[in-house]
Amino acid sequence: MTTRGDQILDRALSKVGGKGLFIKELESALLDGRADLAVHSMKDVPAELAPEFALAATLERHDPRDAFVSGRHPDLAALPAGAVVGTSSLRREAQIRRRYPHLMVRPLRGNLDTRLAKLDGGEYAAIVLAAAGLKRLGLADRIRSLLAPTDSLPAAGQGALAIEIAAHRTDLARWLAPLDHAQTAECVRAERRVSRALGGSCTVPLAAFAEWEAGAIRLRARVAAPDGSALIEAEGRAAPGEAEALADRVVAELLARGARRILDALKEAS
């Protein structure tokens, strides 16, 4: 299916309805029986699902990092002042502006082929995309370098696939249950709880990334001003089974450090 999110290419995603544009029509197909299940990039699934729907499985996470793609330059640090970098994500934009204020960051829309064609056509010196998408489509050779989470913290759910069903389809839930990857699912629950608590959407430069380290869950989160002028971050660790409590602690720490001022300013601007 081709959704409105695929069709509207001349405006920033945050201006035309956000990531929900990619799944609303798929959800309609689930409800009226045209589809039994929908597969999404987890980072595109809104933090709040309507009660008519359920996430039946979270598949094992692929590479969660952002990828730097360019025909001439090896990484962001090598770009000259004024070079144009394309991205569809306010989260990426804010972090790039914060770390590389001498670069120009401009919106980049369209499917993967369209984005790469715009790069190859000279509209951008480089573009930044999710590494998992490039690798899944056999385009890993286009990646010049990968951005470490310390430089570009991933979005909630990035690199993981979600299978969504209509909530009443308990038969499907049983069949799909073996596909659920418990460790990925727990990390994603923590990330999505941060996003939900802070109103995460395409209009909020919010990053949340959890990973397993030495048998514990490490969760990092960031809230930034779109122009990179301010960035608040927090992190914490917890034992397995405590992902949501960990998320609550990290959210509280972000707010205590001043994230509310950024979020309020974004609300006023919208």
Image (spheres, rainbow, N blue to C red):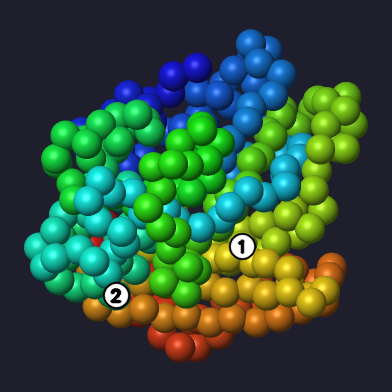
Q: Residue extending furthest top?
A: 34
Give the residue at x 35% y 29%.
113
- Depth check, mark 1 against mark 2: the one in front is 2
Q: Residue beneath label 2, please?
A: 99
Q: Residue extending furthest left?
A: 82
Q: Give percent across and percent down for residue 161.
A: 64, 41
Q: Give percent across and percent down for residue 83.
A: 14, 59
Give 145 or 173, whichever is nearer the viewer. Answer: 145
Side of 132 where 72 appears, left or right: left
- Under circle 2, the secondary element is helix
Q: Amino acid at mark 1?
A: Glu
Q: Give percent across and percent down for residue 218.
A: 68, 75
Mark 1 and mark 2: Cα distance apart in space: 23 Å
241 to 231, vertically: above or below: above
Q: Give percent across and percent down for residue 265.
A: 29, 71
Quadrant location of the C terminus in the rendered image = bottom left
Q: Residue beneath label 1, please?
A: 191
Give the residue at x 31% y 62%.
75
Give the residue at x 43% y 63%.
147
